[in-house]
Amino acid sequence: MKHKQRGISFIGLLFVGGVLACTFVLGAQVLPTLLEYQAITKAATKAAAGSTVPEVRSIFDKAGQIDDIHSIAGKDLDVTKEGDKTVVAFSYAKEIHMAGPAYLLLKYNGRSK
């Protein structure tokens, strides 16, 4: 009697393991940029409480020192008024080196709530 074997081959296992390892490495490099984006959004929302542009930028820079924000500074913010509300907008790009000449470019933009 012949029994048909089921399961994954060793080569298949190596391939799946390689794909999972690459995904893990990529995720480990992207996660800090996402956390920094959330900190920037929180700092921009906090800075929107300011009434003048220099005050808004100062509040953002102080929050950036606390949250360890390095990708953007207060001078890079776009501060506008919409009605009686101050709106703080930002936009920046982050490059992550993958291998050799390959880079992953992440573009972030957002505004205060």
Image (cartoon, rainbow, N blue to C red):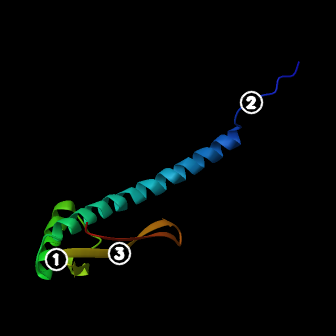
- As drawn, the label of residue 6 is 2
Q: Secondary structure beneath disc 2?
A: loop
The amino acid at mark 1 is Asp
The amino acid at mark 3 is Tyr
Mark earlier in primary sequence (1, 3):
1
Residue 11 on image: x %, y % = 70, 43
Mark earlier in primary sequence (3, 2):
2
Mark earlier in primary sequence (1, 2):
2
Residue 76 on image: x %, y % = 26, 80
Alpha carbons under labels 3 and 2: distance apart: 50 Å
- Tell which residue pokes out farthest to the top in this image: 1
Q: Quadrant of the N terminus?
A: top right
Task: Determine if residue 73 is in view.
Answer: no
Q: Secondary structure beneath disc 1?
A: loop
Examine the rendered structure and indicate whether residue 110 appears above or below residue 18: below
Residue 27: quarter of image: bottom left
Residue designated by label 1: 84
- The residue mark sitting in front, 1 or 2, is 1
- As drawn, the label of residue 92 is 3
